[in-house]
Image (cartoon, rainbow, N blue to C red):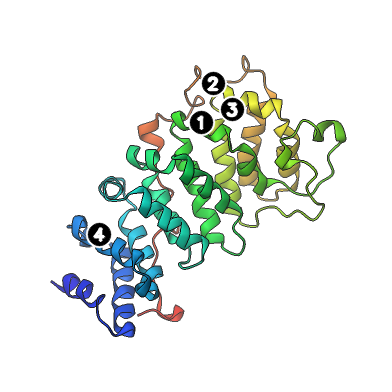
């Protein structure tokens, strides 16, 4: 009853009241998604608000609510059935225009754990735009959540051939401005050649780790390992390993380097199209990394 009243208040003409109601929903859903036992009613209302240009004052709160209620696999499966390509394209537009803080990227990462979500996100027109957000300036939340989305997609080995087309964009955030010998440079993909000396790596540690994990996952496919070797990714990843100060992050990228430098007969891999030995099967490992995914508006940040 109370939740229903709060939802109705979102339509109030008084913007201050509707914003306060939306922030209450953020806080409530940050503690439990069980409040939303009727997603077929609540999700369309959230989408209606996000599509309504007159409701821009509630975009960020609605993005946070949608993220909170799509965290679990069960809820993600329900919610993705209500999302269209048009909805996802809208999410990208709002993210790119900074009309919300980046939690819609987290929503997309949440639905990436479902079969239907992966089919939706891997559509060419959408996936290329998603990849471009890896270098979005000034918004760590977006970059981290896009990296998490890629990591979640990469657990499904059927996605690896698609990732092949975007390897330079995935590796780019890990690349710095170190000098590379001409002979090595010529083997690199064009997009990674002759980068400026002041080229900076991704500043967020978690994003770097997620990208390394993605590279390791897709490296479980022979076609990807072959591309790593043909296009000399070893040089760039080795430079990153030497630059990285965090030991956990270094271990993650060293796992990728190991896949590259070892002969396939020496690498402990399963047959083509399966994950490296030691990783669980797809239905066990595909999950959303939920650390810091629960979002709540705190009083000191101006929330209710």
Q: Earlier in the sequence, mark 4 or mark 3?
A: 4
Q: Residues within 10 Å of mark 4 (few under 14, many from 20)?
A: some
Q: Secondary structure at mark 4?
A: helix
Q: Secondary structure at mark 3?
A: helix
Query: Which residue is drawn at the image coordinates 50% and 19% (left, top)?
Result: 270
Q: Are marks 1 and 3 in contact (CB under 8 Å)?
A: yes
**Cα separation between marks 4 and 1:** 33 Å
Taking the view exactly as shown, the residue that stands out farthest to the top is 265
| Disc 1: which residue | 160
| Disc 3: which residue | 224
Q: Quadrant of the C terminus?
A: bottom left
**Cα separation between marks 4 and 2:** 44 Å
Mark seen at residue 190: none
**Cα separation between marks 2 and 3:** 13 Å
Relative to the observer, which residue lies in front, 141 or 298? 141
| Disc 2: which residue | 269
Q: Secondary structure at mark 1?
A: helix
**Cα separation between marks 4 and 3:** 39 Å
Q: Earlier in the sequence, mark 4 or mark 2?
A: 4
| Disc 4: which residue | 44
Q: Are marks 1 and 2 in contact (CB under 8 Å)?
A: no
Spot occupied by residue 151 in the image (x, y as percentages of width and height): 49, 42
Question: In the picture provided, is 45 more to the left or to the right than 131?
Answer: left
**Cα separation between marks 1 and 2:** 15 Å
* As drawn, 255 above or below 176: above
* As drawn, 298 above or below 36: below
């Amino acid at each position: 009853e109370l939740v229903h009243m709060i939802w109705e208040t979102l339509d109030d003409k008084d913007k201050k009241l509707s914003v306060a109601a939306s922030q209450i929903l953020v806080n409530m859903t940050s503690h439990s998604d069980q409040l939303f036992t009727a997603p077929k009613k609540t999700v369309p209302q959230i989408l209606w608000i996000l599509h309504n240009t007159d409701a821009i004052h509630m975009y960020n709160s609605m993005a946070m609510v949608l993220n909170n209620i799509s965290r679990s696999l069960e809820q993600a499966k329900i919610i993705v059935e209500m999302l269209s390509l048009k909805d996802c394209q809208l999410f990208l537009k709002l993210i790119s225009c900074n009309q919300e803080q980046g939690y819609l990227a987290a929503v997309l990462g949440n639905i990436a754990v479902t079969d239907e979500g992966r089919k939706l996100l891997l559509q060419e027109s959408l996936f290329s735009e998603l990849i471009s957000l890896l270098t979005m300036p000034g918004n760590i939340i977006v970059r981290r959540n896009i990296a998490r989305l890629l990591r979640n997609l990469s657990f499904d080995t059927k996605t690896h051939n698609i990732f092949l087309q975007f390897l330079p964009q995935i590796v780019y955030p890990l690349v710095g401005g170190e000098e590379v010998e001409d002979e090595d440079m010529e083997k690199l993909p064009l997009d990674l050649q002759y980068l400026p000396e002041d080229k900076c790596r991704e500043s967020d540690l978690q994003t770097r780790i997620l990208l390394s994990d993605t590279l390791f996952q897709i490296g479980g496919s022979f076609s990807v390992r072959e591309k790593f070797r043909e296009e000399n990714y070893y040089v760039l990843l080795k430079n990153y390993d030497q630059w990285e100060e965090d030991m956990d992050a270094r271990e993650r990228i060293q796992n990728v380097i190991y896949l590259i430098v070892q002969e396939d007969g020496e690498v402990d891999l399963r047959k083509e199209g399966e994950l490296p030995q030691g990783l669980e099967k797809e239905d066990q490992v595909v999950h959303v990394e939920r650390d810091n995914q629960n979002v709540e508006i705190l009083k000191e940040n101006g929330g209710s």
